[in-house]
Amino acid sequence: MTTIPVSLKVKKEIVEVAEELVKLGIARSRNHAFNIILEKGVREARRLIEEEKKVREILKLVEEKGGLKLGVRDSSRELAEMRDRFWNT
């Protein structure tokens, strides 16, 4: 596994979670803890990417058929809002 050093700012909550992972012995270090957090989160990020790609593909097909004339970003945002309303009810 190749690692690449990066410098980033994170919310205090994330640092606290990383420190708790170290304190409980789940992670060997804060670096290891951040990698655990990122690995868990990357799965969700990949799912969101795939979902967005599918939405854009559908919208492209609809536009090619002469359907909706909304921009891809506006349409995907509206669909995401509808999805969120559906799942949060």
Image (cartoon, rainbow, N blue to C red):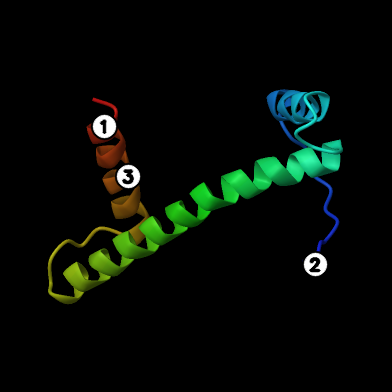
Q: Which residue is outermost to the bottom? A: 64
Q: Nearer the viewer, residue 88 or 77?
A: 88
Give the Cα separation between the discs numbered 1 and 3.
9 Å
Give the residue displayed 83% in from the left and 53% down from the top: 6
Q: Which residue is mark 1?
A: 85
Q: Residue at x 32, y 63 (%)?
A: 54
48 w.r.t. 61: above or below:
above
Give me the C-alpha separation between circle 1 and circle 2: 40 Å
The answer to whether the residues at label 3 and label 2 have Cβ atoms under 8 Å apart is: no
Q: Residues within 10 Å of mark 3 (few under 14, many from 20)?
A: some
Tell me the amino acid under the disc marked 1.
Answer: Arg
The amino acid at mark 3 is: Ala
Neighbour class for label 2 at 10 Å: few (<14), some, many (≥20)? few
Amino acid at pointer 2: Thr
Total marks shown come to 3
Left or right placement of residue 52 versus residue 17 in this view: left
User: Residue placed at 80% from the left, 30% from the top?
Assistant: 25
Q: Which residue is mark 3?
A: 80
Q: Position of residue 30 (x, y in %)?
A: 84, 36
Q: Residue furthest front?
A: 25
| Coordinates of residue 5 in the picture (x, y in percent) | 86, 56
State the quadrant of the C terminus.
Answer: top left
Q: Secondary structure at mark 3?
A: helix
Labelled disc at residue 2: 2
